[in-house]
Structure formats: C-alpha cells, structure tokens
Image (cartoon, coloured by chain):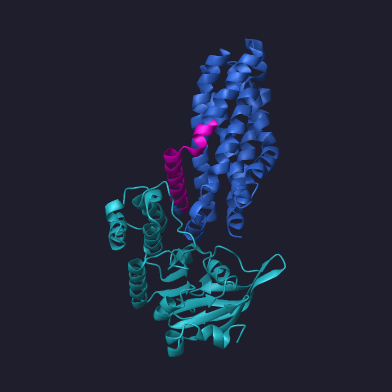
Chain colours: A cyan, B blue
Amino acid sequence: MSGPAVAAAGVWKYFGDYPALRDVRFELGEGECLALLGRNGAGKTTLLRILAGLSGASKGGVAIDGGDVRASATRARVGWLGHSIGLYDELSARENLRTFGALYGVKAATISEWLERVNLSHVADAPVREYSRGMRQRLAVARAFLHGPRLLLLDEPFTSLDDKAIALLQGLLAAARADGATIILSTHQIREAMELASLVALLDRGKLVHYGERTTEMLNDPGYLYRTYGSAA
Amino acid sequence: MTMLRHAAVIATKDLRSELRTKESINSTLSFSVVILLLFAFAFDPSPDMIAEFGGGLLWIVFVFAGALIVNRSFARELPNDCIDVLVSSPASGASLFLGKALASFVLLAGVECICLPAFGILYNVTWWRSLGGLIGVLALGTWSMACVGTFFSALTVNLRLRELMLPMLMYPILIPSLLSAMMLTNTLLTGQPIPSDFTVWLRLLIGFNIIFTTLSVYLAETVLVR
C-alpha cells in the first residue's frame, strides 16, 4: 500500500452545467468504515461511482491505495454493490457467482461457501428471476463479498432487506472490517449505518459539509447530523 | 492472456443468457427466413440473376439480422445494472468488448448456418462448391458486423432510442466491409475461386477488420467509463 486506502482530491463532477459534486476532498485510512450520508440528489451515488471507477471526475481525482481506480489490480481489490443487484435474472445463483468469480479468479469452493453463508444453497441452481427481493439482495451481497475485497463500496445496501438479512449484512461488514477491509456505504438508514461507521461524511448538494468521527450523539439521535451540519442548520 | 480469459468468461455468459432467453435468436431467425422466402417468391430468380445479386441478398439478410443481435449485446446488461458490476470488475474495457463481440459473432454465425442452406434450397444454389472461401468471407464479414455493432451497442446502450440509433451509426460505417463481402460472396456462390482482380475486396475486408478491431479495443474503456 502506498497511500491512504481511499483519497479524493478536489473532486468535481458536472452533469451538463450542473455540479453534482463540488470540490469533495477526504482521505480514508485502511480498516475504516465511512457512512456517506445526504439527502436525495446530494451526490452520494455519484461519488461512489467515481470511487468504483464507473464514472470519471470532471475535475480532481480519486486514488485507491495511492493507485489509479481504473487499474485492473485496484479493481480486483474493490467490491461494488450498487442500487440494483447487478445479477442476471436468467442465470442461476451459482452461474451468476461463477461468472463474476471467474473475473476475479475465485475458486468454485468459495462460491459454494458464499451460497451457504447467505442461505441460498438450497436454491442455488434456480434462475434468479424466481427469487424473492430479499433473496436477490442477499445474492448481490454474496457477489460483492465473493472475492474478499479490501475496499467495499456499498450504495444503499440495506434497501429491501428484511431484519434477518440486515443482521447478516451487518455481520459480514463487521467481519470484513475486523479483517482490515475499508468500507464506504451510502444509506438513508442512519441507525444501521451509525452502528457500523467509524467516520461520517455528510454531502449537501454536492458539497462535503461534514467529515469526521462518528460521535455518540450521532449514534443516539439519527437527526442530529442533519440538524447540526445540514443546509437547514 | 488475462484479457482473453476475461473475454471468454463474458462471451460464455452472454451465450448462456441468450440460450436461456432466446431473446434475439428467435426474432433474428424468423426475420431472416421470412426475408429469404419473400424474395424467392417475389423474384423467382434464374441462376444468372442469382450470380448477380445472390451475395447482395444474403448480406442484406445478415446485416439486418445482425442489427437485432448486436443491439442486445450491451442492452442485455441494463436490467439490474449488470454493466456496472462488469465495469467495476478487473476485466478491462477491451476484454468486455472482445467477449461481447465474440458472443455476437457466434450468434450471427449460427444464424448464417441456418440461412445459407435455406438460401440454397429456396434459390436452387449449390453454395458449397467454394465452401472454404465462402466460410472465410462470411467469417470476415460477420466479424466486421460483430465488431462495429458491439462497439456502437456500447456507445448507444444508455440512449432511449438506441434501437434507432444503432443502425443509423452502424450501417454507414459498415459499407466498405459489406461491399467487399457482397462482391466476394457473389463470386464464390458461382463456385469460382476469387479472381485476382477481386483480391482488392479481400484486402479491403481484412484491412477493415484489423482497423476497426484495433480501434474498438483501444476505445472500449473510454466508451464504457463515462
């Protein structure tokens, strides 16, 4: 590793003339968990997409472990879970994981192990289109964790999960963090995010208005962060 | 080596998905056979006429059928935002492009394998007399369609009118390759080897493929990361 786990240096992103991100700067150390919060349209997904190498910054840049986010070696260390599940409906769970696993050089035994961990081994050979929403989301979680990523970028990971699945995901995230993985998750479910986070960032209309450690007030009062640092503050 | 391995993974996945859903293969096959049938009844062509426009007719069928196949190439990745997962994986843009182009090539070749015998029966053409040459020309022409079509499929995948935009962008670019493939196919359907003055068409077709494959591989990353 030759730099912070994640670094954003003056990132701007324009959609036409509209600045979706405005001079976003932060550095995140290895093993940290950052909760990226903000209202709808604040720029959370845009920032995560730039960090995942899915979109380029208009100005400024991002680096992962000091390297280019689009470098193949960097991407092999990143796990991405976006708004959608990123799975093929016509393929089975096993085929989906086998396809994505093959891109990361994951062994077949690891795939079976993950199907077991997300409680889908009994339906592993059925097409994903036949799955319930929660099952699909659990499979998406397995897909994102499959290759043992050192950086997890999660966009609304708790969406459409039931209580049991949320507990499963929180357990996986805690285990990944204990193993030294760095996590950035954007969410509207502040309570779940605060339980996991060591750092909190608040985006407001593309600007990073707060970046710092998660405090007890944030953990106990979900509205505290917006009241203190949001645009209405 | 890794790039080719990733390309093979993408191609296998695309072919498996297509075999499950038969989204493009069913429409492409029915469209191709109906066109061949309609032309056969409309013109009732003599062997001389076939020698003149047989190649053109075949490539009209292939190129319109091809648009249906390549249109699905990247559109297949839209449900559930699978494209994001592929682009964020260690697979490079070039390997994604090559994998998808390879899958489109195999599907197009499959359609051609069915259309060619149908063409032989409906138009009374003994097309297999120069089989080696014909396979070579079909492979080159098909790769040019798969390559250019896949590239523009990636470029237009997020457009609302992509079904309209793809042929508008793809067909004009394909003119040199289609012209070459058509001229060479015309000759080969008569059972004659490619005459020496026609090698220019063969060189054009090979050159077209080299240029557009290189360009597409080089630009794929830029097109996929917006």
Left or right relative to B212: residue B27: left
**Looking at this view, is B40 or B54 the one in front?**
B40
Residue under the point 43% across and 78% down:
A191
Q: Position of residue B28 (x, y in %)?
A: 54, 32
Q: Does the magenta-highlighted stretch encompass residue B17?
A: yes
Q: Position of residue A192 (x, y in %)?
A: 41, 76
Q: Position of residue B55 (x, y in %)?
A: 63, 23
Quadrant placement of the C terminus of chain B:
bottom right
**Looking at this view, is B217 or A142 the one in front?**
A142
Residue A199 shows in this picture: yes
Q: Position of residue B80 (x, y in %)?
A: 49, 55
Residue under the point 44% across and 70% down:
A152
Count the numbered circles shown. Answer: 0
Q: Start and end of the magenta stretch?
A: B3-28
Residue A229, located in which quarter of the rendered image? bottom right
Residue B42, located in which quarter of the rendered image? top right
* In this view, B46 is above or below B55: above
